[in-house]
Structures are given as structure tokens and as C-alpha cells.
Amino acid sequence: MTMGGVYTFKTKEALELYKQTPLFKSMWTTPIIDPKTLVIEEFENMAGSEKLHDMPDAQWPASQGRSPVCAEDMKDAWMLMYRQKINFNEKMKDQMAVRHITKNFAAANWIGQVPGLRTKFFAVKSSEGENFEHVYKCYIFTSRKAMDDYMNGPVYKQKVLDNPVLK
């Protein structure tokens, strides 16, 4: 079995501090993880993602918008993560254009469009720096059905499969 996790930090400094903690270092000694297979990747959460962190129209099934999210909410929650290569062209000239679109327009294209989509992050891999070629996306759905409906529906086809900016 392969397992993974996504950790979100408010700042790069907070991430670096976490990496010095016993909790972070324990990943190499915990009995459920083979340390030879452990892969740590760092991503920059792109501006615009904050607008999609708590989608207003997708409530968790148990907590129903009340905080905090509870274990019952996670029983059928699913995460979809993927990487797309950017097709730089006349419409998407460079990395600054990607950042501009993500920051200014991405939220308007998603809010209210995908039932059950609770959170969406846009990210670029830190190791690629400012010359990144890929955009990474992480979607959190309130249920498997919501994720499957998205993957089989028109929004996925239009925004992902048929999107000329993405390869």
C-alpha cells in the first residue's frame, strides 16, 4: 500500500521550522513507513488558491459548515491530485501569465461549478523555481461520488481534458 499526505503552511518559514521538529523527523523512524521509500516534495501554493480553500457551496456532510471538521466528515472524503504540463503559447506566454490567471481568474471559474468540491489548490514545484513547466492541482471532495461525478462530467472535460493551455 502507498500512502501520502498534504500539509499546507502559511509561509515558507513555517515549513522550514516544521522540518526541524521531532514530528517531521519521526517519519524516518515510524514502523509503518519504509524510510527508503519516503519521498518529500515541496510545492508553492499559488495565489488564487486561498479563494478556493473553503468552497461556500460544498458543506461537509456531518459538520455542515460548523467548525471544526470532524472524523465523520472524512469517512467518504476523497482527494484528487494531478500534474499538468503547461502549453506555453500566444495565450499563455510565460510563467507570469500562469500566475496572473491563477491569482485573478481561477476562483471565478470554479466556485459553484462542481458539487461536492470543498477545496482546490494550485501549486508549482519548488525545485522548478520560476521556470516551472507544470501546474499541480489538489482537489478535496466531500465524497467519492462527487469526485467521480466531476471526473465524468462536463467541467472536467472543458477545464482539463480540452483546455488548450494544458498538455
Image: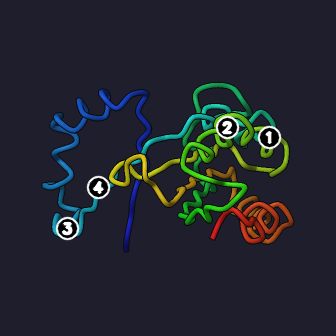
Note whether 127 is above or below 18 in the view shown: below
Sequence order check, earlier mark of 4 and 3: 3
Given the image, on which type of amino acid does mark 2 rest?
Leu
How far apart, in angstroms, are the residues tagged by discs 4 and 2?
A: 24 Å
Q: Quadrant of residue 112?
A: top right
Q: How many marks?
A: 4
Q: Residue at x 74, y 68 (%)?
A: 151
Location of mark 2 (residue): 52
Residue 124: x %, y % from top left: 47, 50
* SS of the residue under disc 1: loop
Identify the disc placed on residue 40.
Answer: 4
How far apart, in angstroms, are the residues tagged by discs 4 and 3?
A: 13 Å
**1 relative position to 76: left or right:** left
In the picture, the quarter occupied by the C terminus is bottom right
Sequence order check, earlier mark of 4 and 1: 4
Nearest-to-viewer mark from 4 and 3: 4
User: Do labels 3 and 2 touch, CB within 8 Å?
Assistant: no
Query: Label 4: how many residues lie within 10 Å, few (<14), some (14-19) or many (20+)?
Result: few
Q: What colour scheme has been applied to the protein in the rendered image?
A: rainbow
* SS of the residue under disc 4: loop
Sequence order check, earlier mark of 3 and 2: 3
Location of mark 3 (residue): 34
**95 relative position to 43: left or right:** right
Given the image, on which type of amino acid does mark 3 rest?
Asp
